[in-house]
Amino acid sequence: MSAVSTGRPSSLRLLPWSGADGKPCFLSTDDSGGHLSRLADNTEAIQLGLSAKLLEHATAVLADEMAAPDELRLLATDLTGALRDTLRVAESRGHRLLPSPGATAKEGPTLSAAAFG
């Protein structure tokens, strides 16, 4: 298996998991199709899917006026973890959307003014 070179220097990718000490983990590679990149992509997809299911569950629990305080506390804990994972995915993907150093504005992603309302 050979690495695919983009012709630009490797950048660090924030991975969707933390190290044993809770610090962020990064991957340095030019190969977005490599084993660790694919593992990170799959992990991100799982995390986002679980977040969506948890949101549905949260909606149901919050609609239940008889929900116990312990159930609400557990829900808040689970939502906090899901939000942390989702923000890490968003940060990682946002960094990968940024143009490479020296690139012109036309090479990076653009949004029209209408996209901002």
Image: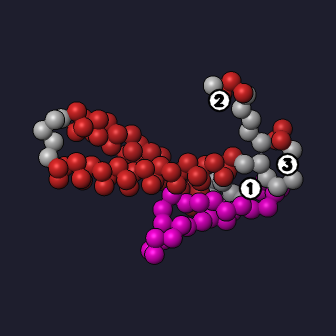
Amino acid carrying label 2: it is Phe
Front one among 58 and 51: 58
Local SS, label 2: helix
Left/right placement of residue 78 relative to residue 61 reads right
Q: Secondary structure at mark 3?
A: loop
Q: Residues within 10 Å of mark 2 (few under 14, many from 20)?
A: few
Please tell me whether mark 1 or mark 3 is closer to you in this view. Answer: 3
Q: Closer to the camera, 6 or 73?
A: 73
Q: Label for residue 4?
A: 1
Q: Which stretch did the figure color magenta? A: 1-29
**Spot occupied by residue 63 in the image (x, y as percentages of width and height):** 22, 33
Residue in front for this viewpoint, 65 or 80 = 65
Looking at the rendered structure, which numbered label has been put on residue 116?
A: 2
Pointer 3 residue: 103
Q: Which residue is drawn at the image coordinates 16% and 35% (left, top)?
A: 65
Q: Is residue 77 above or below residue 51?
A: below
Q: Marks 1 and 2: CB-CB under 8 Å?
A: no
Label pair 1/3, CB-CB below 8 angstroms: no
Q: Horizontal and vertical percent for residue 39?
A: 52, 57
